[in-house]
Image: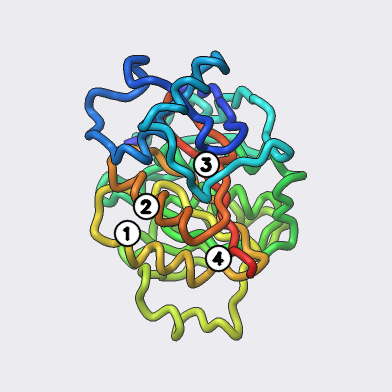
Amino acid sequence: MPVYKNLWSVHLSTGNLSTFCHSSSSGMISAQQPPFPNKIQGIMDCQTEEAETCEKQCDSDDCTWSSNCSSSTADSPVILKILQNWVPRVSHYFDKEHYTYVGHQIIIQESIEHFGAVVWPGALALSQYLESNQEQFNLKDKKVLEIGAGTGLVSIVACILGAYVTATDLPEVLENLSYNISRNTQDMNIHKPEVRKLVWGEDLDEDFPVSTYHYDFLLATDVVYHHTALDPLLATMVRFCKPGTVLLWANKFRFSTDYEFLEKLCNIFNTTILAEFPESNVKLIKATVREN
């Protein structure tokens, strides 16, 4: 069933991650969340409004980790307030939600049978960010691959923005994914999207040979949570991220494993936190291949 329909305020990160400082006494860390590794916690959950306080806290042992994740001062985004794009509407179907992005109404059918058939907050965050930052991330005529596409909301928004989209997920999710993408794009003058099966880490060379498939953007939302396929997921990201590819990953950070995955990502790619959605614990991360 749909969740997370509230109005979000966006606090966008600036500076290197080592400057994100906030003492644990601030109450920003949910009591329901497990303790995170000290290095990650000191960086990801530390924020403050007072620069001097931040500097003092960064001098402590909990805030000295140096990571490859960064947000350069020159590229620091402005602070935005994202509008509520969910459209309240009376419907006879409890499993359909109405959204508005890029001037188009999007109707999403959800299912409670699979995690991938529900609109999670990361999808809303990335959809809104793509809509608001079309100059920074111009998807027109670009080749876009979404992994773990779920209900297809992000892929639909990417299609509306002019991309050649391939939406992928597990076999049991494809029927609902195909239905949503088809019903929301069939009457538009856009590139026809493609829906394909992709199981992380499996049969990639056969199904997506490197000689044929190259993508400008790799999109992923809420693909990291407490499951056993995190290593194959990371391998899949590495597999599709070639020089020139931009990975945009939006995720609700719930567990220590989420932060551990982020640390692994930072060790492999050039990684920047583009935006944070504190009210829903969502972070939007950009990653690109390191060039020697």
Residue 170: image location, x then y, percent: 35, 64
In the picture, measured across the screen, residue 279 lies left or right of residue 71, that is: left
User: Which of the two discs, 2 and 1, sits closer to the camera?
Assistant: 2
Q: Which quarter of the rendering shows the N terminus?
A: top left
Mark 2–mark 4 distance (CA, rounded to whole Å): 24 Å
Q: Are marks 2 and 1 in contact (CB under 8 Å)?
A: yes
Mark 2 and mark 4 lie on one chain; the one further toward the N terminus is 4
| Front-lying residue, 155 or 266 | 266
Quadrant location of residue 79? top right
Residue 44: image location, x then y, percent: 43, 35
Mark 4–mark 3 distance (CA, rounded to whole Å): 21 Å
Instruction: Name the residue at 37% across, 15% down.
Output: 26
Mark 3–mark 2 distance (CA, rounded to whole Å): 14 Å
Q: Are marks 1 and 4 in contact (CB under 8 Å)?
A: no
User: Which of the two discs, 2 and 4, sits closer to the camera?
Assistant: 2
Residue at label 2? 261
Residue at label 4? 166
| Front-lying residue, 269 or 169 | 269
For the question of whether residue 195 can be seen, the reply is: yes
For the question of whether residue 90 can be seen, the reply is: no
Mark 2 and mark 1 lie on one chain; the one further toward the N terminus is 1
33 lies above or below 290: above
User: Which of the two discs, 4 and 3, sits closer to the camera?
Assistant: 3
User: Which of the two discs, 3 and 2, sits closer to the camera?
Assistant: 2
Q: Which quarter of the rendering shows the C terminus?
A: bottom right
Residue at label 1? 230
In the picture, measured across the screen, residue 119 lies left or right of residue 218, that is: left
Residue at label 3? 284
Query: Mark 1 is on which residue type?
Result: Leu
Mark 1–mark 3 distance (CA, rounded to whole Å): 18 Å
Task: Identify the secondary structure beneath mark 1.
Answer: helix
Query: Mark 2 is on which residue type?
Result: Phe
